[in-house]
Image (tube, grey):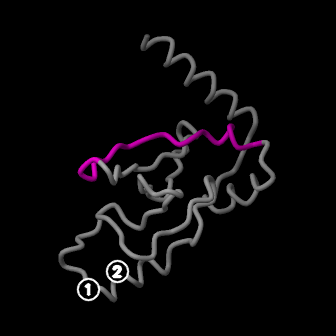
């Protein structure tokens, strides 16, 4: 989290410029005009929502981000974007793994999928 009230415009601009220009999973483009307490955001077109750069959870193999609803008083929701295994057939899979520093093991991936499915069934 950033304390935007205590940051100068130059500090914010530097943080924004240091962030990747394109979010690698969705292809959303970095917003150069502003950021939120959660950090730099990426915008779809049209930009009804803003999204933080996804983070990777090694434990369950998920990529999650914060969605900021720009039409609903900037309501925030933490969401799972996808799982590493969902991306394995993409041409840029190796680039995404490299970007997030992920090592992909298909056996471990299947174990994660099985665990997630088991948890979903248990929570019904």
| Mark 1, other Cα within 10 Å: few <14 / some 14–19 / many ≥20 | few
Question: Compared with residue 78, is residue 45 higher up or lower down, i.e. above or below?
Answer: below
Per the image, the residue denoted by label 2 is 12
Compared across the picture, whether 95 is left or right of 9 comes to right
Q: Secondary structure at mark 1?
A: loop
Q: Toward the viewer: 7 or 116? A: 7
Name the residue rendered at 51%, 12% in the picture: 121
Is the residue under label 1 in contact with that under label 2 (CB below 8 Å)?
Answer: yes
Per the image, the residue denoted by label 1 is 8
Compared across the picture, whether 70 is left or right of 27 comes to left
Q: Quadrant of residue 124?
A: top left
Q: Position of residue 49 (x, y in %)?
A: 41, 52
Q: Position of residue 102 (x, y in %)?
A: 65, 53
Residue 73 colored in magenta in the image: yes
Q: Quadrant of the N terminus?
A: bottom left
Name the residue rendered at 40%, 49% in the picture: 67
Magenta-drawn segment: 72-88
């Amino acid at each position: 989290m950033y304390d935007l009230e205590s940051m100068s415009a130059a500090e914010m601009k530097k943080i924004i410029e240091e962030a990747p220009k394109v979010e690698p999973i969705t292809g959303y483009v970095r917003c150069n005009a502003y950021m939120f307490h959660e950090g730099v955001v990426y915008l779809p077109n049209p930009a009804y929502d803003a999204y933080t750069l996804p983070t990777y959870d090694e434990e369950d193999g998920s990529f999650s981000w914060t969605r900021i609803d720009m039409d609903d008083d900037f309501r925030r929701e933490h969401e799972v974007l996808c799982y590493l295994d969902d991306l394995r057939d993409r041409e840029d899979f190796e680039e995404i793994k490299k970007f997030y520093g992920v090592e992909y093991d298909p056996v471990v991936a299947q174990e994660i999928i099985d665990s997630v499915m088991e948890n979903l069934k248990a929570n019904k």
